[in-house]
Amino acid sequence: MPATPQRGRTARRLTIGAAVLAAAGLTAAALPAGADTGHAARTGRTVDVQLLSFNDFHGNLEPPQGSSGTVEEAQPDGTKKTVPAGGVEYLAQSLRTARKGHPYSVTAAAGDLVGASPLLSGLFHDEPTVEAMNRLGLDVTSVGNHEFDEGRTELTRLQKGGCHPKDGCYEKGRKFRGADFPYLTANVTDEKTGQPLLKPYTVWRHKGVKIGFIGVTLEGTPDIVNAEGIKGLKFHDEVATINKYAKVLNKQGVKSIVALIHEGGMPASTSYNYHCDSPGPGDGISGPITDIAKHVTSKVDALVTGHTHQAYACTIPDPSGRPRTVTSAASYGKLYTDTTLTYDRRTRDIVRTSVKAPGAANHVVDRTQPKAADMTSLITRWNKLAAPVAGRPVGHISADIAGRGATTPESPLGDVISDAQLEATAADGKGGAQLALMNPGGVRSDLAFTASGSEGDGVVTYGEAFTVQPFTNMMNVVDLTGAQLLTALQQQVSGPNETSPKILQVSKGLTYTLDMTKKGADRVVKDTVKLNGTALDPAKTYRVAMNEFLAGGGDGFTAFKTATNKYVGPSDLDAFTAYLTAHSSATNPLTPPKADRITVVK
């Protein structure tokens, strides 16, 4: 089946809100009316607008490998089924099929479209993903924390276009044109000017219908990205920012508003089709988005969220008590959300009653449907450019090694990575590390035994290793006292990480017990922390390896910022690939570690 041509942009023009109004609080000039009252009279008072949305795509143009490429589906009999999903060829086809029969359809995203991407996109600074988003008809997105992975200047380039300042243009005669859709950064402002980094909002218009979109990223972004890339930027409260711009849009006559928020929640079930309004509205979801949803102004009619990589389509009451949909479509293009917004032409608002909110449901991007031909062409073109690098074998494994898809705090792949980092920095002339620690969020995928291409089962290619470790952070080796190290371990489960623990992956030799029946820092059982069988000495100095993100205090690990005597080693990716090569072969592949260094009491 041929792919549906890209929809005309003129028919559904996006009017961008002026960023000048953002922080200055100036009176907004009215937008062009664009309403056709005669048309409204002919077609009736209300019209259903289809809102298609997704989030946290992370450059996964090809179907993700292993558990990263599946979703869990609850069956009528109470069992759960694992369904392969994802890949932009199928995402584009799913969206195009969903749009059929819907004359009013808008497609939005909630951030992290790029960053932490597989090599096919990451090698080219995510230009292939932006090109794919242009082709599949994305209308608008908020900015996620990963859009800042390469800094504010690179994010601006993704929006406006132009060749990479260092690597240049990748194809002769082709210049990167940037995103056809607006990236919205309502709550990210320049410290000097007070202006938003990019546009704070946009208005989608079609045949007299107007819907405003406000885009925000999580306020805590500075805690989870490298500080250098966001220097000079300020991240503001999500609720206050959305409420501010909802007023601006209302003054412009835009009464129908959707917030795109790169922050999310945790549903009580991992099944994408879980009914999270049971037994009552919003009862089946927890996490930061619940508090945000309860305080975002009633002027906003729906919340599209992300960041937690979870799937949910919930109803959470707004401040006035009316139901309002809050949705997230998992990650990596495995799902899309279809929400019906009933637009009232007279009030110019979305119809929401005390009984029923706009209907929303998540749908699987299944791989049994035809592929979108233009996406296949795009993938083929970029794969050809990446092939000399991507296909190089770097190691061999005997079975899947779970990383992102692990169900335990310590993952087998996390052990491999931390061991690799220790080995790369242990020698006296290379840092003298005695142990290594790895942030769990930096492990982006599994290592799958089944071949992704023609390399053969069990062969790990450079491209697959890159997918696991895409940030290429430089390794740091620092001095920490035993007391500082213990504090860092306690920060995994206390402070900002208490409600959503971030368990560091540890190298061989470091062992301890984590008692999750306790609260906060007490969850780390102090007298069980040992290095090579010897109890941790609070007064002794240890050489500890970690990536530069952790060394800078990322993920709430402020204890690492107090370290001294820093040595800069190789990149984490180089350490990982070197380890795979040194410790595996076709006849003696690497076996998955037991992941038994951290004993967890539940």
Image (cartoon, rainbow, N blue to C red):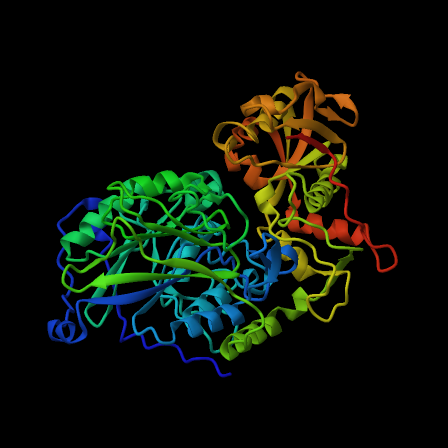
The quarter holding residue 347 reads bottom left
Q: What's the residue at 76%, 37% (across, down)?
A: 427
The answer to whether 503 appears left or right of 42 in the picture is right
Looking at the image, the residue that sits furthest to the top is: 539
Q: What's the residue at 41%, 80% (across, down)?
A: 5
Looking at the image, the residue that sits furthest to the right is: 587
- Whether residue 306 is situated above or below residue 489 in the rendered picture: below
Question: Looking at the image, can residue 236 be seen?
Answer: no
Q: Residue 97 at what x, y percent from top left?
A: 44, 74
Give 75 or 265, whichever is nearer the viewer: 75
In this rendering, the count of numbered labels is 0
Q: Residue 184 at what x, y percent from top left?
A: 33, 55
Looking at the image, the residue that sits furthest to the front is: 77
Q: What's the residue at 27%, 42% (across, down)?
A: 321
Question: Looking at the image, can residue 501 be seen?
Answer: yes
Q: Residue 539 at what x, y percent from top left?
A: 66, 16
Q: Residue 602 at what x, y percent from top left?
A: 64, 30
The quarter holding residue 86 reads bottom right
